[in-house]
Amino acid sequence: MTTLDITSPAARPAVPGPEPKKRVSGRQMVANALTLAWRNIAQLKHSPEKLLDVTLMPIVFLLLFLYVFGGAVAGSTHSYLQVLLPGLVAQMTMFATMGLGTALNEDIHKGVFDRFRSLPIGRSSPLIGAVLGDTARFLTVIVVLTGFGSALGFRFHTNVLAVLAAFGLAYVFYLAVCWISVLIGMIAPSPETVQGIAFIFIMPLVFGSSILVPNTKTFPGWLQAWVKVNPITHLADAVRGLTVGGPTSTHVLYTLAWAAGIVLVTFPIAVRMYSRRV
Amino acid sequence: MSAVIEAAGLEKRFGETQALAGAGFSAEKGTVLALLGPNGAGKTTAVRVLSTLLKPDGGAARICGYDVVHEAVQVRQLIALTGQYASVDDELTGSENLVMIGRLLGLGRAQAKDKARELLARFGLTDAAKRATKTYSGGMRRRLDLAASLVGDPQVIFLDEPTTGLDPRARNQVWDTVRGLTANGVTVLLTTQYLEEADELADHIAVIDRGRVVASGTASELKATTGKQTIEVRPADRFRAPEVAELVTRLTGETPEVRTETGLVTATAVDPAVLSELVQQLGQRGIVAAELALRLPSLDEVFLALTGHSADDQNVNEDENHESSEELADAGRTA
């Protein structure tokens, strides 16, 4: 058995090659994150079925909500579509993040993250890479929603810049919510439980909002109070304002503030959990 | 010259389970060290500590002189880990997996591709390079996993149960690969439950049981530590076996086991001098021995002698419990 004197500087056996670096540089961390984002894109190339949920969900929700609520809420499906579609952009932005936590939890269980954690790369790079790589899911949602929505009769009433700003805002919020999904992926005991935990957070946010019913005056007082602070309300209303017209600036600011707040809270905890997870 | 892998007094507890209870071992450059022990002995935990994935509760470990806790960044530049479950990405091709690791280690796009091509060829995976690894067989995955470990030209490679679940042919391929690694001065630490594997591959073996090293040395040193050897003698005329058995009893003081169908007489012997005495006595009686040997104990017997239980003893299933108890510990910290 060996005795190891941990107080004295170690005699280092000669190691060929350059002396190991003391820390991972910022530039290297960015490069690592981009490589890991590429990993997600490459996975989609071999398993395009991973995008099936974000392709079908917008279509199913659009058809269901449009024909179930259209007459009751807006008098006709045609006028409801103009209100519903921006709301669904907000809803699907939330739903599309859920796959990420599951995928990361699978990475942990399969041992893929063990290898990453034993590599000299930035601690947060695998998580940042996974979030960036997930952009494909967001883009799919937007393309399917606007494409299918237009086929049903949805029309933009603003200009191109405003529409791009709407999607840009949704994307910023998407990236922020991804970190909630990442955090759940780090905490959940198994991939199967990730969705269950995520739903508990996502359901009250998504449906306790103005996405389905823009006129929230009929809600009871406590629900109106919740709807007013709910970031999904602000995101949906901001997207409405930027795509079909209406008040915008306050909702944009609220959404951005919420996005910043979510990242500030979840990012450090997620990275910490990831470093500790064994 | 100091050792490339040094560990002393390693301790790690997961809830109720003391996974490591003061384990210590070391390995010189270019050698293979095997941590041999049953499920739940603490082998995987030891590898996770050495590969910077887990902080020990006590003790210290160094890789090439760098502390695995305080100098983890440097350590990660010197090591490569091949986990118990092949940790390749199922949804990427073999080539993409290796290119990804190369890029993460700072190789340029072209360099990473060259390295991937070279390693795929070396591991006989060129034909499967463009296939998603979920279509690979167990042996192919393990080979790809090993190849991934070599992308960064590491000084130290950790192989956690590299052949568990492989068929004999795939196992032999992995063995050949491991033997090739040390030729370039790479130091290998492997964990195994298979005594045969440790015997085949390792320069040094540390027998680990319940979180501590209960014996260490070369395979033959370990075999010698139990002090017991087996004497085997088979008379050419199998009907003279009872006579031989009586002789063996007199010399060793043990009642030998006699196989009537072959006439093989087996008994444990402590004093090696018994052999020459036996040869003399057999000669005097005119018994011709068709087979006569003094055999060192098998590692299985050594393991039993050292730990008081057999290596196949599956009653300690701690490895499987590790993960859940670690998760509980995690949940406790965040709560």
Image (cartoon, rainbow, N blue to C red):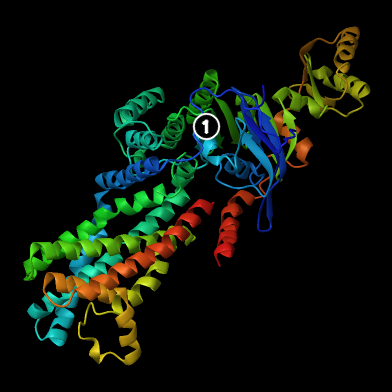
Between B226 and B146, the residue placed more toward the observer is B146
Between B184 and B228, the residue placed more toward the observer is B184
Task: Look at mark 1 in the image and give the residue it sits on.
Answer: B78
User: What is the quadrant of residue A172 in the picture?
Assistant: bottom left
Name which residue lies at 92% across and 21% down.
Answer: B251
User: Which kind of residue does numbered mark 1 sit on?
Assistant: Leu
In the displayed structure image, the side of residue B20 where residue A26 appears, left or right: left
Image spot of residue B137 (x, y percent): 40, 36
Image spot of residue B292 (x, y percent): 78, 15
Image spot of residue B133 (x, y percent): 36, 39
Name which residue lies at 41% across and 35% down.
Answer: B105
**Quadrant holding the N terminus of chain A:** top right
How many residues crowd around disc 1 within 10 Å: few (fewer than 14), some, or many (20 or more)?
Answer: many
Q: Is residue B260 visible?
A: no
Location of residue A90 with respect to A53 vertically, above or below: below
User: What is the quadrant of residue B94 in the picture?
Assistant: top left
SS of the residue under disc 1? helix
Name which residue lies at 40% across and 73% down.
Answer: A200
Location of residue B282 with respect to A49 vertically, above or below: above
Which of the chains bears the disc numbered 1?
B
Location of residue A233 with respect to B204 vertically, above or below: below
Image spot of residue A58 (x, y percent): 20, 66
Count the numbered circles shown: 1
Between B62 and A66, the residue placed more toward the observer is B62
In the displayed structure image, the side of residue B133 where residue B180 appears, left or right: right
User: What is the quadrant of residue B2 in the picture?
Assistant: top right
Name which residue lies at 40% across and 59% down.
Answer: A182
Q: Is residue A223 visible?
A: yes
